[in-house]
Image: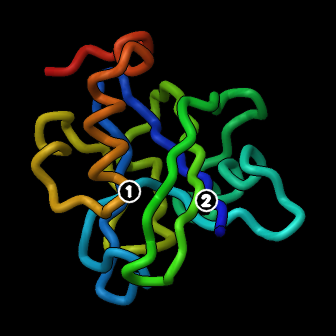
Amino acid sequence: MRRFSAVLLVDPRGWLLLQERDDGAPIDPDCWGLVGGHVEDGEDFEPAAYRELLEETGVVVEPGILQLWREFTLDHRYTHGNVDTMRVYVAPTRLTDADIVCGEGRQIVFVEPGAARDLTLTTAAAAIVPEFLDSDRYAGLGATPG
């Protein structure tokens, strides 16, 4: 079983930071997913979330900002023969697209919640994004989706 950490940042409009994967992605190419990736050997989930956020977006957030929302079991048997674990960390942010440096994939941008539901999502994001948008945690971030 492999381990993954992912991050969902939510701006004041209620828009989610999502990544459009390119055609070279080993899992779910050409789909939209969460910022994040593998937890390295000897690394814990939370530090991996901060590291992946930095590597993929250039964004540095202070320790303690990202809060664990949920742990998911991901079925990657069709691509890698594994059932994996992903922990999703969330935080409100005042960042904009202009603050994001796309370090991986085609683009990493804030996406309107209704549009996020209609994107071609990765297997993981297809389970996670709608559940997050329907959650008390999302509502509690003070976002005002429009």
Q: Specify the quadrant of the image occupied by residue 137.
A: top left
Q: Specify the quadrant of the image occupied by residue 119.
A: bottom left
Q: Specify the quadrant of the image occupied by residue 114.
A: top left
> 5 above or below 9?
below
> 98 above or below 56?
above
Mark on residue 10? Answer: none
Circle 2 crowding by C-alpha within 10 Å: few under 14, some 14–19, many from 20:
many
Residue type at the position of mark 1: Ala
Q: Quadrant of the N terminus?
A: bottom right
- Residue 49 horizontal side relative to residue 25, left or right: right
**Along the line of sight, which residue is nearer the eye, 40 or 76?**
76
- Residue 89 horizontal side relative to residue 130, left or right: right
Circle 1 crowding by C-alpha within 10 Å: few under 14, some 14–19, many from 20:
some
Mark 2 and mark 1 residues within 8 Å of each other at the beta carbon: yes
Residue at the outermost bottom position: 24
**Residue 77, percent across and down?**
44, 76
**Along the line of sight, which residue is nearer the eye, 48 or 58?**
48
Which residue position holds label 2?
A: 4
Which residue position holds label 1?
A: 124
Tell me the SS state at disc 2.
Answer: strand
Tell me the SS state at disc 1.
Answer: helix
Residue at (12, 43) in percent of width and height:
115
- Residue 21 horizontal side relative to residue 65, left or right: left
Residue at (41, 83) in percent of width and height:
79
What is the CA distance from the residue labelled 2 to the residue labelled 1?
11 Å
**Residue 27, percent across and down?**
40, 77
**Residue 68, percent across and down?**
62, 31
Residue type at the position of mark 2: Phe
Residue at (24, 43) in percent of width and height:
111
**Residue 117, percent across and down?**
16, 43
Give the mark nearest the N terminus, 2 or 1. Answer: 2
Residue at (36, 43) in percent of width and height:
128
